[in-house]
Image (cartoon, rainbow, N blue to C red):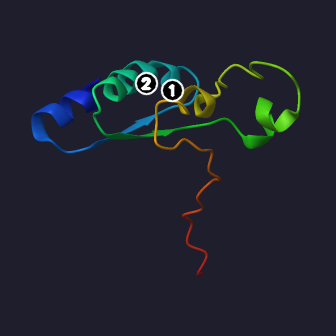
Amino acid sequence: MAAEAYYRVDRNMAAVCVTSGPGTINALNGVTGAYQDSIPMIVFSGQVKTELTVRNSGLHLRTLGGQEFDIVSALSEMSRTSDVQGILDISDNSG
């Protein structure tokens, strides 16, 4: 909701970063409000290890573990794009 207010005051798109599980679920309120009012924002969410996700398991479960929530499916109807990305390696291996 703070990202929505930021846009209303400054007319600049906000970036939001939330943790996996409860963080993504809490962000849904703000994303839904922004969607209904056509307010742009970008949300980055953490995610459990790919190996521990229901999507990767092939099982017909809603959740696997304590912090998983399929945010991609939840946001697919109210966002331009939602996708799971791999881990970005920012380490310097040049020696």
The residue indicated by pointer 1 is 24
Residue at 58% in and 58% down? 88
Residue at 64% in and 24% down? 69
64 with respect to 6 (left or right): right
Vertical comparison of 39 with 30: above or below: below
Task: Identify the image quadrant of the N terminus.
Answer: top left
- Percent across and percent down for residue 57 are 86, 34
- Percent across and percent down for residue 77 are 53, 30
Quadrant of the image occupied by residue 62: top right
Quadrant of the image occupied by residue 7: top left
In the image, 59 versus 87, the foreground residue is: 59
Dot 1 and dot 2 residues touching (CB under 8 Å): yes
Quadrant of the image occupied by residue 10: top left
Residue at 30% in and 39% down? 40
The residue indicated by pointer 2 is 27
68 with respect to 55 (left or right): left
Task: Name the amino acid, label 1.
Answer: Thr
The tally of labels here is 2
Residue 49, label in figure: none
Residue at 40% in and 18% down? 29
Circle 2 SS class: helix
Q: Residue furthest bottom?
A: 94
11 with respect to 37 (left or right): left
- Percent across and percent down for residue 34 are 32, 28
